[in-house]
Every structure is written in structure tokens, then in C-alpha cells.
Image: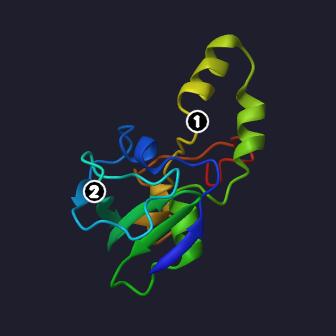
Amino acid sequence: MVEVPALDFSLQATLSSGQAFRWTTIDDPSPRPGGLARDSAPSPDGTGLRWHYGFIGSAVVKVRQDGARLLCESADPSLTPSRLQHYFALDLDYSSILSSINVDMQVHQAIVRYRGLRVLQQHQAHRRDDRPALPGLRHSGGPQWLPGV
């Protein structure tokens, strides 16, 4: 099992935000000894754990959040902690990003309401070369905190 720190992150909000459609949520009916961590995602009946099944690139993964950590299982040896952190944007300075975009009341309210939502870094997870996804597409410069833009 791969485990990575997931501070200020919401797996549920990120995967249900409409960014990716290859994820399914399944509740594990077996209860966890010792109860759940504060930020864990229990099943709706509170007796088990909520797992998310999907793909990161070509790797089939099973992932869940347990408080401030992300737990992931996969048979694919290429799914390393750094690849998992990159896919879920856990390798970015989230506080700096939020500070830089918090410029008016509407944005501030969105930050408060959707705290922990991250932009999935799918472009690197699916592509294995440096060619643009679409012929003729060129990336112009973007904010430094958006790698590859």
C-alpha cells in the first residue's frame, strides 16, 4: 500500500468535481478497528470505509483518504508515492496558490466552500511523451504553480 501525506486535501471533493469520469466509489462493509480518523470517509451507514476505484494513467488504483493521508493500492509498480502526489496535486504549494487567487469576495467564498479540492494533474498521468495532446496545440506561459501550462 502506498501512503502519502494529504494536508488540506479532500479526495471526495476532488474526485466528485467533474474533472475525471473514470472513478467509482464503493463502500467497504468491514469496520475499521479503533474507529475512523476525523477526516476519513466512512460508508453512509458508518460501518465501513469508502474506497475510490479508478485509473491513474494506465494503472488501476484503489484509493481512500484517512485524515491527512492518502492510502492507495495498485498492482502497478509504476504507481509511486511521487506519481500519486503529482496526480492529486499534493506536490504543489496549496497555501500559496490560494493566497494568489484570493482577490475578491466571490473567489474567497469559493475557497472556503471548496477547501481541499485540487486540480487533477491528468495530463502527465496519461501522456508518456512531450507532444501536445492535440495537433497544433501550443502551451503559452502560465502561472509558475501550474506545471506544464
Mark 1–mark 2 distance (CA, rounded to whole Å): 26 Å
Corner quadrant of residue 6: bottom right
- Please tell me the numbered disc located at residue 14: none
Say which of 62 and 92 sits in front: 62
Name the quadrant of the N terminus. bottom left
Say which of 113 and 61 sits in front: 113
Q: Is residue 130 visible?
A: no
Residue 71: horizontal and vertical position, in percent? 46, 69
Nearer the observer: mark 1 or 2; the answer is 2
Q: Is residue 44 visible?
A: yes
Q: How crowded is mark 2: few (under 14 residues within 10 Å), some or many (20 or more)?
A: some
- Please tell me the numbered disc located at residue 115: 1
Query: Relative to residue 46, is residue 2 drawn left or right?
Result: right
Task: Name which residue lies at 51% across and 47% down.
Answer: 10
Q: Mark 2 points at which residue?
A: 47
Please, what is the three-letter code of the amino acid marked with disc 2? Thr
Please, what is the three-letter code of the amino acid marked with disc 1? Arg
Residue 53: horizontal and vertical position, in percent? 28, 63
In the picture shown, does residue 17 fall above or below 134? above
Query: Relative to residue 108, is residue 29 drawn left or right?
Result: left
Asked whether the beta carbons under mark 1 and mark 2 sit within 8 Å of each other, the answer is no
Q: What element carries label 1?
A: loop
Residue 77: horizontal and vertical position, in percent? 42, 87
Which of marks 2 and 1 precedes in the sequence? 2
Task: Name which residue lies at 51% across and 68% down.
Answer: 84
Q: What element carries label 2?
A: loop
Q: Which residue lies furthest to the top in this view?
A: 105
Task: Name which residue lies at 69% across and 46% down.
Answer: 94
Task: Name which residue lies at 52% across and 79% down.
Answer: 80
Say which of 103 and 129 sits in front: 103
